[in-house]
Amino acid sequence: MVRDPRRGAHARDLLRDHSELERERGAAAGQRLGLLWYEWVHYVAHIPYVPKTAFGRWIKKYHLWHHYKNERMWFGVTNPSMDFVGRTYARVDDVERSGSTRVLFPK
């Protein structure tokens, strides 16, 4: 008896297509959650709300340095990792205040 090599291929293709679809759905869900996280942290950084966690307070202060100290530094909204890569991270005391940033507390 000769066996047809194509027999059962359809079922394997369906399983493969299903797993690819699940990976795509997972990636899309991860992207949406990441965007939601980014937007939420950015929103909280700009409203008069004090985050409850130490990390939340720190990341809010970190982002506000970008607006009120020097707009060419501290681009990280949700974390500073890419600021290290892009060399836009520095200690706040080591950076001159830009003339074009807003004055939060004028003297």
Image (tube, rainbow, N blue to C red):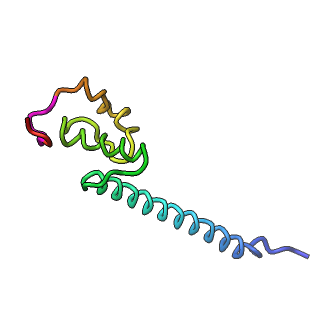
In the displayed structure, 98 sits above or below 10; it is above
Q: Identify the image quadrant of residue 47.
A: bottom left
Report the label total.
0
**Is residue 52 covered in magenta?**
no
Prevailing secondary structure class for the magenta stretch in the rendered image: loop
Residue 80 or 32: which is nearer the viewer?
80
Q: Magenta segment, which residues? A: 97-103
Residue 85, horizontal then vertical, whole percent? 37, 33
Task: Work out which residue is located at the far top of the displayed protein and give it.
Answer: 94
Q: Identify the image quadrant of residue 61.
A: top left
**Is residue 100 covered in magenta?**
yes
Q: Residue at x 19, y 35 (%)?
A: 69
In the displayed structure, 57 sits above or below 17; it is above
Q: Residue at x 37, y 32 (%)?
A: 84
Residue 76 left/right relative to 26: left
Residue 72 left/right relative to 100: right
Residue 15 or 7: which is nearer the viewer?
15
Residue 34, horizontal then vertical, whole percent? 43, 57
Quadrant showing the C terminus: top left
Residue 76, horizontal then vertical, whole percent? 33, 43
Q: Residue at x 24, y 38 (%)?
A: 65
Residue 75 left/right relative to 29: left
Residue 99, horizontal then vertical, whole percent? 8, 34
Task: Work out which residue is located at the far right of the displayed protein and give it.
Answer: 1
In the displayed structure, 45 sits above or below 22; it is above
Q: Residue at x 39, y 61 (%)?
A: 36
Quadrant showing the N terminus: bottom right
